[in-house]
């Protein structure tokens, strides 16, 4: 063997040995000497990011974290520099507004990433709290009470069309996949509000091609954090549950950009989101910026609402008592379907309790939203500055520490004590443990619209139809069938409708 080859072998061997020694020493440090070494959790989760990477991309992360909390308690270390909490106090500590002597926890660098590795221009991803506050203030008119009243007409228009399509298609023996139909409806509503035009899904009783693209783009978003933690996997994305490179997010961004450009050129004064945004001359009205906001609106305004509606419908179909009480309230409260709107549904206590319970038992965003600790305490635990921290929405909202019968669908827990359906067993429930829209300065800006949509859609569905689960829906185990890809991927939910005769 020649001298050059021997030298190469020696160098290569030395590099491998030093590499292995580095990895070994890093593992030992992470497990035993890291500032977070005192916090409970699996040792191999503390050793490297691989536990998190494969759990996060495996589709069951929310359930994995819940099991970790059951085993280790209210705070769990699930990666070398990451802690997750399952206490109601941690919501305020992590996501709340800054107070005297306590800094606001900032978003980490995960939120910097836009499609294709570009810097994200979405308001919800802005890490600087001052800039975020300024942008949110400027966008607020698009989500104000007066704007919401104007937007109600858009919601009612598509709900009316949706109900008529269900009358045509929902009576067959096989029924309809209402999970899919919810997506069509919310997608059309947000399309009209964001871009000034419908996607035609409800009108054609057929999903728009962009709907599955958006879902795949959301799923690909998981890879951003994976590649940040384990850069080598960027070159082998198929090692992570067969994922491919995140191309759908780029395609979605391009589609949004084209629609935004078309909407801006139209010069329309209709009462949609962009009519409010473009009136404000202080905003950055560049095409990339508006495209970023449009992407946020489409995902947050369609997929999350559709998920909440699908989950709530599943639990209603599997809880006859709750479904019967909802039917009784809705059908005794209105004379005509035209009387069902945002204002009238707001005064229906059981309907609103059903929505609150649906959001509690199946929150559309199940995983904790990471923040960077400023060095303050969280739920009484001293957490070093720079630690990535989160509260598991899924675990906390389903904890027996905060709710009686936490895994049961019980809208009654949200009623006032003088309501005839109130039950004393819920007297000690800690309702603040359910925070499906988060809290503090980063709470969902579209909360009002989401609740408006859910109230009107569920009320109209219950007013017009008796619903029955078919094609396996009665036997379906929802929790075993869903997977988590940033948001939820849900199974088909087949229902057959029977029109109510009046």
Image (cartoon, rainbow, N blue to C red):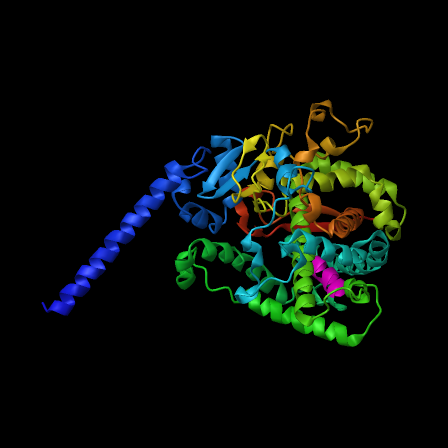
Residue 460 visible here: yes
Would residue 458 be counted in the magenta stretch?
A: no
In this rendered view, identify the residue nearer to me: 353 or 217: 217
> Does residue 83 lie above or below 417 as drawn?
below
**Left or right: where does residue 271 sit relative to residue 75?**
right
Q: Residue 16 falls in which quadrant of the image?
A: bottom left
Residues 177 and 30: in front is 30
Does the segment drawn in magenta span residue 186? Answer: yes
Q: Start and end of the magenta stretch?
A: 184-194
Where the N terminus falls, by quadrant?
bottom left
Q: Main secondary structure of the magenta part?
A: helix
Q: Position of residue 12 (x, y in %)?
A: 22, 60
> Residue furthest toward the bottom?
265
Q: Quadrant of residue 200?
A: bottom right
At horizontal 40% and vertical 63% (from top left) the residue drawn is 235
Measured along the vertical axis of the image, is residue 273 above or below residue 331?
Answer: below
Image coords of residue 62 (percent x, y): 53, 43
In the orientation shown, which residue stands out farthest toward the top? 424
- Give residue 482's position: percent from left, percent from top: 55, 48
């Amino acid at each position: 063997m020649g001298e050059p080859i021997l030298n190469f072998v020696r160098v290569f061997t030395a590099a491998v040995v030093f590499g292995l020694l580095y990895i070994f020493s890093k593992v030992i440090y992470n497990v035993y000497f890291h500032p977070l070494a005192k916090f409970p959790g699996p040792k191999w989760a503390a050793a490297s990011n691989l536990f998190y990477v494969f759990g996060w991309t495996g589709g069951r992360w929310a359930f994995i974290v819940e099991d970790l909390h059951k085993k280790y308690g209210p705070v769990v270390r699930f990666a070398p520099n990451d802690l997750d909490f399952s206490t109601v106090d941690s919501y305020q500590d992590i996501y709340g507004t800054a107070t005297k002597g306590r800094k606001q926890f900032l978003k980490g660098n995960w939120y910097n990433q836009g499609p294709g590795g570009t810097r994200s221009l979405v308001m919800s991803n802005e890490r600087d709290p001052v800039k975020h506050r300024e942008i949110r203030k400027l966008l607020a008119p698009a989500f104000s009470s007066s704007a919401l009243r104007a937007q109600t007409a858009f919601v009612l228009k598509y709900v009316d069309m949706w109900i008529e399509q269900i009358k045509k298609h929902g009576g067959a023996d096989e029924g309809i996949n209402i999970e899919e139909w919810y997506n069509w409806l919310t997608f059309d509503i947000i399309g009209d509000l964001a871009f000034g035009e419908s996607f035609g899904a409800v009108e054609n009783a057929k999903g728009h091609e962009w709907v599955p693209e958006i879902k795949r783009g959301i799923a690909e978003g998981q890879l951003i954090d994976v590649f940040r933690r384990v850069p080598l996997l960027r070159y082998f994305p198929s090692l992570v549950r067969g994922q491919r490179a995140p191309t759908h997010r780029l395609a979605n961004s391009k589609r949004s950009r084209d629609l935004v450009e078309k909407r801006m050129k139209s010069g329309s004064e209709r009462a949609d989101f962009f009519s409010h945004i473009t009136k404000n001359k202080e905003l950055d009205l560049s095409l990339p910026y508006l495209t970023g906001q449009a992407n946020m609106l489409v995902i947050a305004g369609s997929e999350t609402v559709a998920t909440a509606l699908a989950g709530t419908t599943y639990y209603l179909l599997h809880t006859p008592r709750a479904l019967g009480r909802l039917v009784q309230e809705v059908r005794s409260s209105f004379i005509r379907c035209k009387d069902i709107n945002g204002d009238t549904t707001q005064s229906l206590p059981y309907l609103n309790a059903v929505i609150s319970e649906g959001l509690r038992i199946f929150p559309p965003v199940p995983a904790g939203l990471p923040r960077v600790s400023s060095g303050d305490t969280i739920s009484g635990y001293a957490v070093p500055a720079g630690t990535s921290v989160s509260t598991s929405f899924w675990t906390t909202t389903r904890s027996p520490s905060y709710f009686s019968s936490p895994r049961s669908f019980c809208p009654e827990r949200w009623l006032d004590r003088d309501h005839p359906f109130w039950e004393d067993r819920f007297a000690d429930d800690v309702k603040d443990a359910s925070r499906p829209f988060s809290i503090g300065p980063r709470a969902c800006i579209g909360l009002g619209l989401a609740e408006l949509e859910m109230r009107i859609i569920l009320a109209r569905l219950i007013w017009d139809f008796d619903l029955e689960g078919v094609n396996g829906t009665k036997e379906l185990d929802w929790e075993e069938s869903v997977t988590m890809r940033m948001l939820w991927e849900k199974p088909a939910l087949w229902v057959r409708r029977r029109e109510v005769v009046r």
